[in-house]
């Protein structure tokens, strides 16, 4: 296999505050302009997706909102819960988040982030004529390691994995359990240019060696039976 | 805060098979050539670091080797253990890995990957006159999510975190618990261009908005007392 060429990751700046019902694909297409090309991967922060879809709630009792978004609470610490969301994601407060939201509101995760990604991808293709893959991302904590990283909660138009199982290494030895969650790595890479308070809600990745075609972020959820750490 | 400019991530190709005692910084500097510039972040797969440092063992009973590298075994499944390494990292088989190793050998993690990163950084500066940050990376699985991603096990010349706590968002609201493990995101981004069987053992990241200065990957280890998932 040849070494892949380099990656480029460009911030998408200039998307205005998103309101329920907004045509997010149109806002992204306008902000991205010629930077967006066929074959790119567009990573979009879930917050603008949720806002466009009206997944916003009054802050009220935020703990109660988080519980309503959870199917299971794995741990509690003070005000914070580590919960399983309806999608199967494990994260703090079931993804309910108060930053970068106007007024006294919180943003919830999209009801079906894979569907959100597919719709964005379809609408972008219609508006721009460009076929891209779409990742909807959120910022999650992890077990065992400090700090948070961005991961993929919705995926469309690409396999979320790069599966090296069965390939051979330089010494002809079969690679073992290497199945890279490339959608998560791309979400994390995009986070680096999106920042947190800069108003950049999306990033364009060029040159990612992903497998185009169907794929979803639900495949990134480890089933409870296969999870040794719940 | 202005939106950061884009990132570029370039593979470093052409490093020959690394042997114990090799001057890895010299091999990397030669392979990177003019692609490496002051201010870049150089991500290096731990495998070549370990090989240069002689952290290679005969395969023998691989389970026994993994146990010898562990300070604690958290879980077992079949042949695989999830272990805590001497550094505090939680990963499969204590990081003992057989792929991309010539002969009947396995590669262990460096004894002190932060020290490895600092030495590489210092030696690169001496050889090339360029001050860069260095991340030593490995491929780890995660709780709750399928697939593996690359993370930082050694860091030099940069803060492994981008700490947004205390910053305000676009609406003047203080950001909550957002402390991004940017070294892990950079390691993951570099993985995308390094691949697994391509013989590319390093990548250069340009434009990363990291905080230069001292920093280490040990800070990425969550202390057992603060870890709800052990």
Image (spheres, coloured by chain):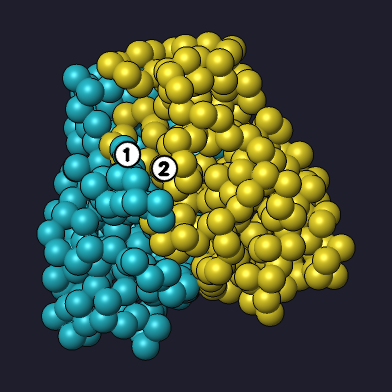
Chain colours: A cyan, B yellow
Which x, y percent locates residue B2?
62, 69
What residue appears at the point 27 percent right and 26 percent down from the top-left corner?
Answer: A84
| Left or right of residue B109: residue B197 | left
Q: Which mark is residue B99?
A: 2
Q: Are marks 2 and 1 in contact (CB under 8 Å)?
A: yes
Count the marks: 2
Please state the horizontal and vertical placement of residue B101, each as a whole percent of the image.
48, 44
Q: Position of residue A206 (x, y in %)?
A: 39, 74
Q: Is residue A13 above or below residue A182?
A: below
Residue at 55% from the left image edge and 45% from the top image edge: B47
Residue at the spot of label 1: A176
Cα distance between the residues tagged 2 and 1: 7 Å
- Residue A38, relative to residue A189: is it above or below? below
Q: Are marks 2 and 1 on the same chain?
A: no
Which residue lies at the image location 32% right of the left edge and 39% below the top edge? A176
Residue A58: x and y, percent? Answer: 34, 39
Rendered residue at 49%/21% (across/down) = B66
Q: Tag 2: Cα neighbours inside 10 Å, few (<14), some, or many (≥20)? A: many
Q: Is residue A13 left or right of residue B110?
A: left
- The crowding category of the residue bearing disc 1, from other C-alpha atoms within 10 Å (few below 14, some 14 to 19, many at least 20), is some
Q: Answer left or right for A163 relative to B15.
A: left
Query: Which one is nearer the viewer's eye here, B80 or A209?
Result: B80
């Amino acid at each position: 296999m040849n070494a892949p060429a380099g990656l480029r990751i460009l911030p998408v700046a200039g998307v205005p505050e998103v309101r329920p019902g907004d045509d997010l694909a149109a806002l992204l297409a306008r902000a991205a302009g010629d930077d967006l090309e066929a074959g790119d991967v567009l990573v979009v922060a879930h917050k603008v997706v949720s806002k466009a879809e009206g997944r916003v709630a009054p802050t009220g009792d935020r703990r109660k909102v988080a519980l309503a978004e959870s199917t299971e609470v794995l741990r509690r610490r003070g005000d914070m819960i580590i919960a399983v969301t309806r999608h199967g994601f494990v994260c703090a407060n079931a993804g309910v988040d108060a930053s970068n939201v106007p007024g006294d509101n919180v943003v919830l995760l999209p009801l079906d982030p894979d569907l959100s990604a597919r719709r964005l991808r379809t609408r972008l293709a219609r508006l721009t004529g460009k076929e891209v893959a779409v990742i909807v991302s959120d910022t999650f904590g992890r077990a065992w390691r400090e700090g948070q990283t961005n991961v993929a909660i919705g995926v469309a138009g690409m396999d979320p994995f790069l599966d090296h199982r069965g390939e051979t290494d330089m010494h002809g030895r079969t690679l073992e359990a290497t199945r890279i969650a490339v959608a998560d790595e791309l979400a994390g890479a995009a986070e680096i240019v999106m920042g947190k308070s800069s108003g950049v809600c999306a990033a364009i990745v060029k040159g990612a060696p992903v497998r185009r075609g169907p794929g979803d972020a639900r495949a990134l959820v480890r089933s409870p039976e296969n999870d040794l750490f719940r």
